[in-house]
């Protein structure tokens, strides 16, 4: 699967499948080589941003906001060809959507309050340079950025 094709497909799917496709794509691109807990944390950050309404009112809008998540940072020709990692990302995305459909007091959180993260393989973004992370999972650092 190519990223461009997958994002096009998400645009014509029913909302629930569209959201799961966009979230799974983000989890796959951002964290497929990370522990499952880290993949869940990436999904949680995207869901928290959707809940805030600042980056869009649905998951696809959030993960496709310019320069926020991997779907807008990697070339559209990027192949998502690791089927084991895709299946895991798909399942994590589905569970995250169910979790976030619950009242906030009933949700399970991995990184409470985190609305941003970065991979330690890149230079820290400006917003992370003077802040202590809320959590470090695998090679990702998670933050609550105001």
Image (spheres, rainbow, N blue to C red):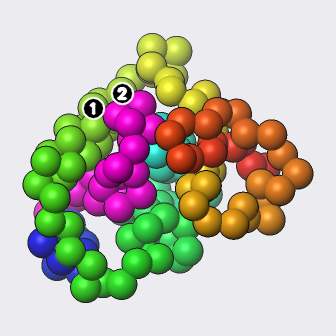
Q: Quick check: 104 left or right of 36?
A: right
State which quarter of the image contains the N terminus: bottom left
Looking at the picture, tell me which residue is in the foreground, 56 or 63.
Answer: 63
Q: Quick check: 110 left or right of 129?
A: left
Q: Residue at x 53, y 47 (%)?
A: 139
Q: Is residue 65 above or below residue 40?
A: below
> Can residue 2 be seen at all in this image of the molecule?
yes
SS category of the residue bearing label 2 = helix
Q: Position of residue 112 (x, y in %)?
A: 61, 28
Q: Residue at x 21, y 49 (%)?
A: 85
- Which region shows up in magenta? 13-40
**Which residue has dot 1 on it?**
95
Mark identifier at residue 50: none
Looking at the picture, tell me which residue is in the foreground, 140 or 14.
Answer: 140
Q: Residue at x 79, y 59 (%)?
A: 127
> Can residue 23 be seen at all in this image of the molecule?
no
**Which residue has dot 2 on it?**
99
How much space separates mark 1 and mark 2, taking CA atoms?
A: 6 Å
Q: Residue furthest top?
A: 106
Q: Position of residue 36 (x, y in %)?
A: 35, 34
Q: Quick check: 92 left or right of 127?
A: left
Number of marks present in the image shown? 2
Q: Residue at x 69, y 43 (%)?
A: 143
Q: Evaluate if marks 1 and 2 touch, with contact meaning CB atoms under 8 Å apart.
A: yes
Q: Is residue 51 above or below residue 25?
A: above
Q: Image quarter for residue 142?
A: top right
């Amino acid at each position: 699967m190519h990223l461009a094709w997958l994002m096009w497909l998400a645009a014509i799917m029913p909302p629930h499948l569209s959201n799961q496709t966009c979230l799974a794509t983000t989890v796959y691109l951002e964290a497929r080589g990370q522990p499952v807990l880290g993949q869940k944390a990436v999904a949680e950050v995207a869901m928290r941003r959707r809940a805030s309404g600042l980056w869009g009112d649905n998951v696809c809008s959030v993960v496709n906001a310019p320069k926020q998540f991997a779907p807008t940072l990697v070339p559209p020709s990027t192949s998502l060809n690791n089927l084991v990692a895709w299946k895991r990302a798909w399942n994590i995305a589905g569970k995250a959507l169910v979790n976030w459909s619950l009242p906030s007091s009933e949700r399970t959180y991995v990184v409470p309050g985190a609305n941003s993260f970065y991979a330690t393989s890149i230079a820290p973004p400006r917003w992370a340079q003077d802040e202590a992370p809320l959590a470090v999972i695998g090679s990702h650092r998670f933050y609550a950025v105001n």
